[in-house]
Image (cartoon, rainbow, N blue to C red):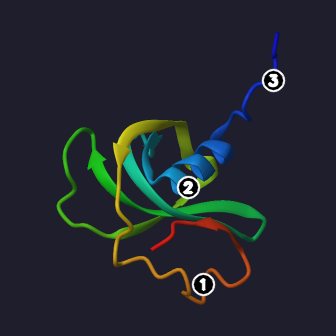
Amino acid sequence: MNTATAPAGPVPTVFEAIVRKRCLRATYNRTDITLAPHIIYTRHDDLFVDGVVVERDGKPPKEVKLGTFKLAGLNGVGLTERNFAANPLFAANDPKYGDAALMAVEV
């Protein structure tokens, strides 16, 4: 019997979402969001995710924009079945990522 399990927790979930281009669900500042994560990176020894919120409390946002989320502030992170395409607002070569990028979507 194989008792090995996949890594659990928000970091491997974000990695999987980026690789598979699947949205995440999470709670951020007491708001339920569906997020299309584009990159996970470190800054000042903390993990951050930049992505596009596709739903906030079940409704599409008023404006499509690339947001930055401190991973520690995303609660209840889970993978959804919703796919996403890389947003043109995302630039993997942005200097803010420098050598700090751990994983990014392929554009």
Q: Nearer the viewer, residue 59 or 12?
A: 12
What crowding class fits label 2: few (fewer than 14 Cα within 10 Å), some (14-19), or many (20 or more)?
some
Whole-angstrom CA distance, mark 1 to mark 3, is 37 Å
- In the image, residue 12 lies at what x, y percent? 67, 44
Mark 3 and mark 1 in contact (Cβ < 8 Å)?
no
Give the camera-side residue of 35 and 105.
Answer: 105
Mark 3 residue crowding within 10 angstroms, few (<14) / some (14–19) / many (20+): few
Mark toward the start of the polypeptide (2 vs 3): 3
Q: Which mark is residue 4?
A: 3
Label whose residue precedes the other's in the sequence (1 or 3) = 3
Cα gap from disc 2 to disc 3, whole angstroms: 21 Å
Q: Nearer the viewer, residue 24 or 18?
A: 18
Please name the residue that numbered disc 2 is placed on. Answer: 19
Residue depicted at x 36% and y 78%: 89
- In the picture as drawn, the residue positioned furthest to the bottom comes out as 95
Q: Is residue 46 above or below residue 32?
A: below
Vertical arrangement, residue 55 with respect to residue 106, above or below: above
Q: Mark 2 falls on what kind of element?
A: helix
Q: Are marks 2 and 1 in contact (CB under 8 Å)?
A: no
- Tell which tag, 1 or 3, sits nearer the viewer: 3
Left of 91 or right of it: where is 84?
left
Distance (Cα) linking label 2 and label 1: 21 Å
Q: Amino acid at mark 3?
A: Ala
Depth check: give the residue in front, 85 or 54: 85
Percent coordinates x, y for residue 102 in the rendering: 70, 66
| Residue assigned mark 1 | 96
